[in-house]
Amino acid sequence: METTPIETAELSGDVWLRRTLYVIGGCFLLRLLFAAVVPLDLVHDEAYYWEWARRLDVCYYSKPPMVAWLIAASTSIFGDTAVAVRLPAIVLGTGGTIFVFLLARDMFGSKAGFWATLLSLASPGSAALGLVMTIDAPLLFCWSVALYAFWQLLKRDRTRFRWLVGVTVAIGLGILSKQTMLAFLLLAGSFLLISREDRIELRRPALWICAILALCFLTPVLWWNVQNGWVTLAHTSGHFSAEQVTMLKRLTRFLEFIGSQFGVVSPVTCWLFLSAGFVGVYSFKRCDRCTKFLLTFSVLPLLGAFALAFKQRVEPNWAAPAYIAGVVLAVGAVFQSHARVLEAKGSDRRLSIALGTGIVATVLTYLLGFGLGLEGTKLDPAVRLRGWAELGVKVGDAFAELPEPNRSLLVVTNGRAYASELAFYMPQHPEAFVWNPSGVVSTQYDVWGGPRESESRTAMIVTGGPTVPPELAACFGQVDPIREVTVAISSSRHLTVHLWRGVALDQAMVDEQIGFGTHGRERFANVALRPDLHRLER
């Protein structure tokens, strides 16, 4: 029998809703202030996606287009600043928790919704993913909306069509954010199979139409890949190609992934979720419909991540969607257990401990952004976000000394990270090209290709070492050294590049070389599925 929503306090649902909105609003302002005040440079992926936003398309080499569309919308209004790049993550990462509240309130009452919101926000993972603009911000927002809309859809009342549209759009936009959203369809189907009350939906056309229409959002992505040799599919499949490692190494990685989840979610909250998940799975047949729904969308994907972690290295954020339903499951389990023994205030104790631990971990995460004397050390979690702005300004000063800086090229030999960071932080925001002599399409820069005939024939070449690759030098009539640029992050860590001026770009030589990403779209069919393509950046 389905559990009746539990109101464990004399306060009305409207009061808990107002308190939740105050918390969400306060968290949004805190994150916005942090992004504006703390001098943390864009992480490599953020700068890389900003490059995508400058050249809008319906798909990109490694990901669907949503992250680029959101950054383009924000920067077109607020300019090319780090805060503008991160604003969509702050809005989506914080605002998405309102749907966590709504789902928990619908299942367990308004107070449970308030606690679920608090625990969702009070975690290091939420602090990071709600601030750094990567593909996870729109994915998790869409997942939250789809989860709540799907639950409402299954009520089969007069608002059914509205929720059918809502879940279709949420899944579709989520698919355009990250391929992981496709798993939502599999999880939804799994719940319909295991829920006796909802199994009838599999014999009705509505949800099948919903799934088909959601998949239709992939049409432009598929068309782009048809034109480009299915490079996105090849890249994605590379994530599931296990390395040949020893069993001990596999076990070590598996344990590392499990440990990372306690750090990302916060220890007590993670423990409450895992405990509720274990009990729920053990007594699954006796669980009510709400619990089965939450178990399907939390424990099932987490078990999938655990299995993958035993096979290969898995990033901690890959399991993030599981914790949207997982936090609601944990809070609901606490409220239900204490309601059964009539301890109205007992539920607050465990949740208060979880909240306190989460707040401490979150505050520590934000404080580490200031450095606290750890800048550039192995203990600095933000080490990859330091030094790029200063490096960009210094390289930009040298770029301004070129004869025609407004028409000159930026050619980088040490990868997409340097190319995108310099393109963003150099005052000129030059168009960047990455020298890729491998003949393998491995970044979006390769898809865009090399310099065109109409572009300037002068370039600044950026190298990580004291020499220019001979094949690259051969593309110019003359290559002259400019200077070495170094930015000190700490006494032991530096960012160093060597700058060169290349003049008289020989277009015929460029077209002849395999570098500059000059593969051309017509050649992707020959290179996209080569075995060494799986040597991808993570």
Image (cartoon, grey):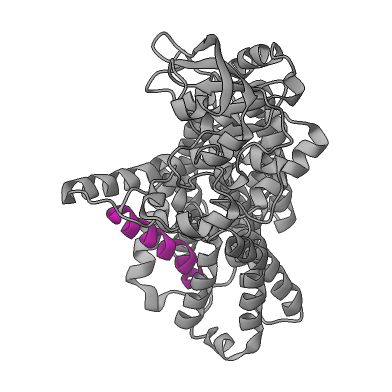
Residue 188 makes an appearance in the image: yes
Image coordinates for residue 447, horizontal then vertical, percent: 58, 47
Whether residue 293 is in magenta: the answer is yes
Q: Residue at x 56, y 51 (%)?
A: 61
Toward which corner of the image does residue 264 lie, by quadrant?
Answer: top left
List x then y, in percent, for residue 481.
Answer: 54, 11
Closer to us: 295 or 420: 420
- The x, y position of residue 174, in whole percent, is 62, 59
Per the image, is 49 magenta? no
Q: Please, which residue is most extreme toward the right here?
A: 77
Q: Main secondary structure of the magenta part?
A: helix
Region of the chain picked out in magenta, as a range: 291-311
Quarter occupied by residue 276: bottom left
Residue 9 can be seen in this image? no
Relative placement, left or right, of 433 versus 339 is right
For the point 45% across and 11% down, the residue is 490
Q: Position of residue 472 (x, y in %)?
A: 51, 28
**Image height check: is 294 above or below 251?**
below
* Residue at the farthest bottom position: 203
Q: Does 377 sit above or below residue 177?
A: above
Task: Tell me if residue 420 comes above or below residue 492 in the rendering.
Answer: below
How many labels sit on residues?
Answer: 0
Nearer-the-camera pick, 480 or 435:
480
Q: Residue at x 36, y 69 (%)?
A: 281
266 w.r.t. 174: above or below: above
Placement of the C terminus among the 4 image quadrants: top left
